[in-house]
Amino acid sequence: MKKTIILLSVLMLFPAFCIKASAQEERPLVVASSDSGVSSLEMLSHIGFGYNFLQTDDFTPIGSGEFFVNIAKLSIYPAEAFGVEIGVDYKTVDFVSHDQAFFLDGDKKIQVQPYKAKYPVAFDEKKNFSRLRTNTFSAPVTLNLVAGVAKLSIGAEANLNLTGRIKDKYFVEGKKTKNIERGVPFNRFNYNLLAAVSYNDFGIYFRYYPKNSKLIPEGGIDVSYMTLGVILGL
């Protein structure tokens, strides 16, 4: 599954990269225009990095974050200061624990247990970690207010969650050991609210996931989170 996702992402991003690299102007490719407004299509317009603030009683996180890259973005501006943007992004979300290890039970539900219970070997406890990762295609839709190179965006985002993976790493007598479990199931769809403030090619964004929009299916670990991060223009 991982190789398939990487191949599909490369196939989608390579033509966009060629278009971006061969463009002679910094403006996005304009596909339609009128006296009253402009519509434009951009590819590989930005990337983002975020930190997830978790709420869970099931495990002790040592870090949680996300990375995303824009695949395509359609901007429709009926007026110079107001418009709508519709995008498609590829995103990964990580949950990481030091004391507990993620695993799938007999019903394919995501659970945690003490690290030593999953790996009853003598390892260096200061270096081990267990990471749960998702692979997601997101479709953000935002309303935008623009003033020069400054922009305020507010909207929502629909997420198509693919299967993920669990990666465990620990050291035994100085030798690194890695175990990867693929095909970890998540809720196929969820959504979040989105807000961002940007200036030129730099922005700060915030994602909020309502309580009825869970990433992990019922019966697994209970995790709620919100994300704060930065956006960098490409």
Image (spheres, rainbow, N blue to C red):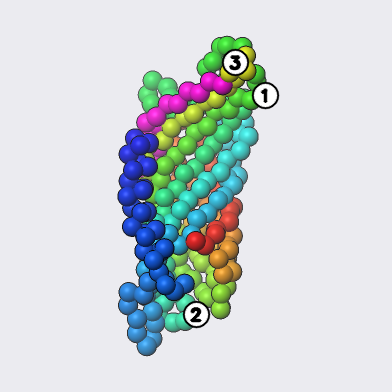
Residue drawn at 32 percent across, 77 percent down: 32
Q: Are marks 2 and 1 in contact (CB under 8 Å)?
A: no
Residue 22, image x, y percentages:
39, 66
Neighbour class for label 1 at 10 Å: few (<14), some, many (≥20)?
few
CA–CA distance between discs 1 and 3?
12 Å
Three-letter amino acid code of the residue under disc 2:
Ala
Residue placed under numbered mark 3 in the picture: 172
First in sequence, mark 1 or 3: give its number. Answer: 1
CA–CA distance between discs 2 and 1?
52 Å
Residue 107 higher or lower than 155, as above or below: above
Residue placed under numbered mark 1 in the picture: 126
Work out whether residue 176 or residue 66 is closer to the camera in this orientation and state it: 176
Quick one: SS at disc 1? loop
Q: Are marks 1 and 3 in contact (CB under 8 Å)?
A: no
Q: Nearer the viewer, mark 2 or mark 3?
A: 3
Residue 198, quarter of the rendered image: bottom right
Residue placed under numbered mark 2 in the picture: 81
Residue drawn at 41 percent across, 63 percent down: 21
Residue drawn at 57 percent across, 40 percent down: 64
Res 62 visible: yes
Which residues are drawn in magenta? 176-189
Quick one: SS at disc 2? loop
Three-letter amino acid code of the residue under disc 1:
Lys
In this view, the residue farthest toward the bottom is 35
